[in-house]
Image (tube, coloured by chain):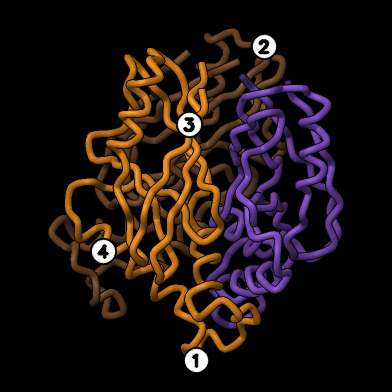
Chain colours: A purple, B orange, C brown
Amino acid sequence: MITTLTLQTYGPSLYDFTGRVEDALSEASVAEGLLTLFVRHTSSSLLIQENADPDVLADLNEFFRRLVPHTDETSMGWVRHNSEGPDDMPAHIKAALTQTSLSIPVQNGVMMLGAWQGVYLFEHRDRPHRREVVLHIGG
Amino acid sequence: MITTLTLQTYGPSLYDFTGRVEDALSEASVAEGLLTLFVRHTSSSLLIQENADPDVLADLNEFFRRLVPHTDETSMGWVRHNSEGPDDMPAHIKAALTQTSLSIPVQNGVMMLGAWQGVYLFEHRDRPHRREVVLHIGG
Amino acid sequence: MITTLTLQTYGPSLYDFTGRVEDALSEASVAEGLLTLFVRHTSSSLLIQENADPDVLADLNEFFRRLVPHTDETSMGWVRHNSEGPDDMPAHIKAALTQTSLSIPVQNGVMMLGAWQGVYLFEHRDRPHRREVVLHIGG
């Protein structure tokens, strides 16, 4: 089964959409199988990360901002692809450093996430975006 | 088919568990299909890496330690999530930079790994941990 | 269905092989399912990235070259695994930071890529190499 979720983002941050995926799984009524998520963009990405302390999410975002600064900062002066703004090429790099697809085993109709795991869309662009994540649920 | 492996770790390092996965595959008796591994934690991760020279594993570990130092080092003074120790937030970051899930095609009952590829759990926490890796074997 | 593509590379760069994957999908005649790609090497990797501006690919390559310099540069003096040349250990690290496997949902016989997404082999070694990418196409 394939279904597509649309997620609205408002700047660089990790957006928890675990509940949206759980809802889609419920509708699919698959007892056991494999769920695969796929983000249809190259300037946002997917991560499974801690769902307990929101500081973890803020720190993750900050780490990537420091590792890959905007291209109007001196250390990024070598970047060629600047036509779409100083956040664009860093967004592609951050997407390359994280995930475009993720697979999660499903048992008894639910994802086999660990106790502290949530499913996140990692937005890397500054402006609001509508993002599509495709869900494939297989046997 | 779904099965869960438990792996004991003793500090930051890459732990080869290729043999454990091979054993689980043998029991599953799947001639052709897709094996997916999923780690149920956000401070350890998965990697497929070279199985020949142990220096490669040590160097990988060292690279990540330098890229993401413990939070009691000056360069990481900006980190907020410090309550679980100086190795905790770096562990989440290193997990984000590597893999939570991995998929490997299976043919004639064995993983189609290259000659130099092994399957590793990458532990990012300092203290010993018991880690769970879920295996899904599909058609 | 499992098939293997062989790709020739000529030094560090992102090599677009979206068309090769599309051809293999056509032959498989799978209307709906999941395509998984797996690279059988630890010094090259997979990425889904922007297929529009070639500067994005050049900048990605340059970012990784700066993040993980060759081991004959001073900042990499700590590396132990040097026997296969100054580009070898950095190649393993860059592969660890990107993907060994990728999964893409398939609908109406085609990959559900976004408008700007292409499928790339990311070569990290300096010399020419022949690389194998296994494709698994499941239900």
**Residue at 71 percent of width and 15 percent of height:** C108
How far is disc 2 from disc 1 in space, using C-alphas? 55 Å
Using the rendered image, report if marks 2 and 4 lie on a common chain: no
Label 4 or label 3, whichever comes before in sequence order: 3
Task: Determine the image quadrant of residue C138.
Answer: top right
Q: Amino acid at mark 2?
A: Ala
Question: Considering the numbered disc 4 on the image, is that residue within a helix, a strand or a loop?
Answer: helix
Question: Considering the numbered disc 3 on the image, is that residue within a helix, a strand or a loop?
Answer: strand
Q: What residue would you read off at disc 2?
A: C31
- Mark 4 Cα shell of 10 Å, populated few (<14), some (14-19), many (≥20): some
Q: Amino acid at mark 4?
A: Ala
Disc 4: which chain? B
Q: What residue would you read off at disc 4?
A: B58
How far is disc 4 from disc 1 in space, using C-alphas? 24 Å
Between disc 3 and disc 1, the foreground one is 3
In the displayed structure, would residue B96 be above or below residue B132? Answer: below
Q: Amino acid at mark 3?
A: Thr
Determine whether label 3 and label 1 are within 8 Å by CB: no
Disc 2: which chain? C
**Residue at 53 percent of width and 52 percent of height:** C57
Residue C81: percent from left, percent from top: 19, 62
- Mark 1 Cα shell of 10 Å, populated few (<14), some (14-19), many (≥20): few
